[in-house]
Amino acid sequence: MLDQGKVFEALADNGVTYFTGVPDSYLNGFCNYALARCGDRNVITANEGNAVALAAGHYFATREIPLVYMQNSGEGNAVNPLASLADRNVYAVPMLLLIGWRGQGDTEPNHPQHKLQGEITAPILDIMRIPYTVLTDDNAHFAGTVEKAVKYCGETRGAYALIAPKGVMADPDKPNNVDALYPMSREEAIEVILDHMPADTIYAATTGRATRELFFLREKRNETKARDFLNVGSMGHASSVALGIALAKPDRPVVALDGDSAAIMHMGAMTMASKVKAPNFLHVVLNNGAHESVGGQPSAGHLVDFTGIAEACGYRTIGHAVTSREELAAAVERLKGCGQAAFIDCRIHKGLSRKLPPIVFDHRQAIDALIADLNG
């Protein structure tokens, strides 16, 4: 991994001291250094498009060149403002883009959700006419690249991307940081829900730890995985997949096991509860206030009133967050037959309750099993 002190020194030497974006595991060294040392000059955003727009506003107000960081899966969220706000033919916003390159080559054979994204990471930049450099684990190369990139941004008022392959900006060992803010772990919360929902319930688990924990809870409990949708990619969209199933199969209870960062990323999806009737849909946000899967950086999860937002969007709630197994069980029992789409903000602590291996499964086989169950 690059020496992050030298990384930030090189950026500062070239006038880049404002950072915004969405944390990525391939950038966790960079993200954690910025979190620890940059104060309000580092802003973690709801999604990558949000970060590009925030960076644009910062440039308009200061003339400083900002840096926007993201996983390559976030390029899709960033395309719209990069092409129609920051582009040189529109408002010409110079900025550095630091992009973690998941799915490069055959580096992640067990994660097909990154394969296509890895292949199109650079071509997306080519299409948007954004030049880029693939970084190496060489501090001198990084310093030279930053100097070249910032010069380009300044002369053209355009964007320049720095693509970070595996190991360049990230420590391979991610600690399991467990706090004691709330008594329940995510795995314990999921198990409470499994215990109190009908056996034929369909589950859609959000990207990251929730998918892994649901997968291994099924094995621990000797239960079928044929009723589970594991949203291994497309962060922020698990609840929409779940709602689509619930609308098509009104006789089946459907639970979205969401994360706070994922729900925030595409919070507009929550408004669908006011537009459609889905009394069989239960949306649970497993809220630990962190981007845990990529390094534990803080989210706004514990700062916003999810319950109030959900009620305003048309969900039935119990009026407050739950923080214990008993409260969660009571909330599930109260809401699962309430006659309208329901929502629970489930406050949990950070960290894994037990060490789990990576999920290795056949994605097509898994989705075909769910399709068969839904159409059997």
Image (tube, grey):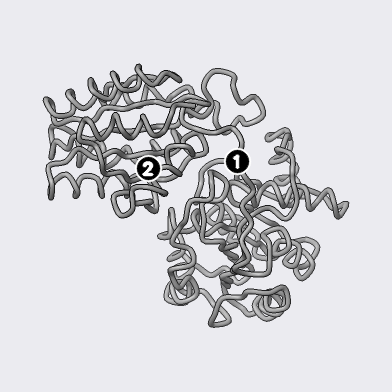
129 or 250: nearer the viewer = 129
Which sits earlier in the primary sequence, circle 1 or circle 2?
2
C-alpha span from label 1 to label 2: 26 Å
Q: Which of the 4 image quarters holds residue 304?
A: bottom left
Q: Which amino acid does label 1 sit on?
A: Lys
Does residue 281 show up?
Answer: no
Element under disc 1:
loop
Q: Residue at x 72, y 55 (%)?
A: 353
Residue 263 location in percent, x, y? 49, 58
Q: Quadrant of residue 287?
A: bottom right
Percent of width and height locating residue 318: 58, 81
* In the image: residue 227, left or right of residue 239: right
**Identity of the residue drawn at 42% across and 42% down:** 33
Which residue is label 2 attached to? 77
Q: Name the residue under label 1.
A: 174
Q: In this view, does 298 lie to the left or right of 227?
A: left
Name the secondary structure under disc 2: helix
